[in-house]
Image: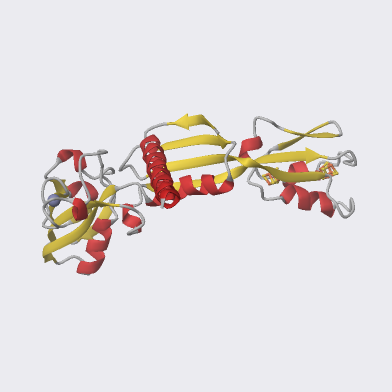
């Protein structure tokens, strides 16, 4: 199995996974979205809310604000020695107090741990008119996307099989498929259609080129054919800002390795029994 990183920055990464089964690629995708823990606001105490939003809606919006999560700093509250009471090891507290007129922004959430501040400060929460007020206390805990989407650290997390395009000998070079392709993956030189290898990874597998070719009356089979490599995948991952994208991938692989070890131990026990 091979991983080739094509792009990586704080918020996103793109890589090619080769030599893997589709089930493994899907397990990596699911682990990134559902098994990597991050902080999210889980309970909100509302002292004052004269805004146009119901308390429940306000709490819901606060829950969706991505919070920076340093790996290993906090433990899930269910595993903490405080037994669910909430302490410095498992819980971050926030205060928010804003009076109108003006917008309540995510940056108005002030944490007791500066490292767990909102990852994006300019998310609008609610607009306050003159005299309206919001005063809340909130508590964030660590959990995973499996429990609720607000603990999902990815905004985009997907893959596609690596595209393979072929042009058969009965192509007459009419160029219809080139015009039909929205991603400009095909190009026409004289009467010859070829795949632009620098753009092949942009192919969305939409098959509009095949449809275009069939519309020319070429017969039952289009001359251009769209296929995929069964064991090669192009992954795109984008973080919501809570955890760097590469760290999300690292943690998901660690999770899968842990699950694999668990399975191996269980199989050993069964074999010994
Ligand atoms: S499948 Fe779609 S994106 Fe890919 S080459 Fe054909 S028309 Fe273009
Ligand atoms: S539409 Fe079909 S026949 Fe025309 S150039 Fe494309 S592949 Fe060849
Ligand atoms: Zn605790």
> What x and y, as percent, mark residue 163?
66, 41
Q: In the rendered image, is residue 155 in sight?
A: no
Q: Is residue 109 rendered to the left or right of residue 251?
A: left
As drawn, the residue found furthest toward the front would be 273
Q: Residue at x 50, y 30 (%)?
A: 5
Quick check: 91 above or below 229? below
Q: In the rendered image, is residue 13 in sight?
A: yes
Q: Residue at x 51, y 35 (%)?
A: 15
> What x and y, as percent, mark residue 266?
40, 50
Quarter of the figure with residue 59: bottom left
> What x and y, as percent, mark residue 40?
25, 52
> What x and y, as percent, mark residue 190?
85, 31
Count the marks.
0
Q: Is residue 176 rendered to the left or right of residue 127?
A: right
Quick check: 166 above or below 212? above
Quick check: 150 above or below 114? below
Q: How is the image coloured?
A: secondary structure
Q: Residue at x 70, y 32 (%)?
A: 196
120 or 256: nearer the viewer: 256
Ligand 1 quarter of the rendering: top right
Q: Residue at x 83, y 49 (%)?
A: 222
Q: Is residue 101 rendered to the left or right of residue 28?
A: left
Q: Quadrant location of the N terminus?
A: top right
């Amino acid at each position: 199995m091979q991983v080739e990183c094509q792009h990586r920055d704080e918020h996103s990464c793109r890589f090619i996974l080769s030599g893997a089964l589709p089930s493994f690629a899907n397990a990596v995708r699911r682990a990134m979205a559902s098994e990597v823990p991050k902080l999210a606001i889980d309970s909100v105490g509302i002292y004052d809310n004269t805004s146009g939003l119901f308390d429940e809606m306000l709490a819901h919006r606060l829950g969706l604000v991505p919070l920076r999560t340093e790996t290993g700093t906090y433990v899930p509250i269910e595993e903490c020695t405080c037994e669910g009471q909430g302490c410095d090891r498992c819980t971050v507290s926030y205060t928010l107090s804003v009076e109108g007129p003006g917008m309540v922004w995510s940056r108005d959430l002030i944490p007791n741990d500066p490292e767990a501040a909102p990852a994006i400060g300019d998310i609008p929460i609610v607009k306050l008119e003159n005299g309206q007020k919001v005063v809340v206390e909130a508590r964030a805990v660590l959990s995973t996307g499996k429990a609720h989407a607000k603990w999902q650290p990815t905004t985009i997390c997907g893959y596609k099989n690596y595209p393979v395009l072929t042009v058969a000998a009965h192509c007459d070079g009419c160029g219809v498929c080139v015009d039909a392709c929205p991603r400009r993956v095909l190009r026409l030189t004289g009467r010859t259609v070829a795949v632009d290898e620098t753009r092949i990874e942009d192919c969305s597998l939409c098959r509009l080129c095949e449809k275009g070719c069939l519309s020319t009356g070429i017969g039952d089979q289009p001359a251009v054919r769209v296929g995929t490599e069964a064991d090669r995948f192009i992954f795109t991952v984008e973080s919501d800002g809570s955890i760097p994208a590469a760290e999300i991938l690292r943690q998901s692989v660690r999770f899968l390795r842990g699950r694999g070890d668990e399975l191996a131990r269980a199989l050993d026990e069964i074999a010994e029994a």
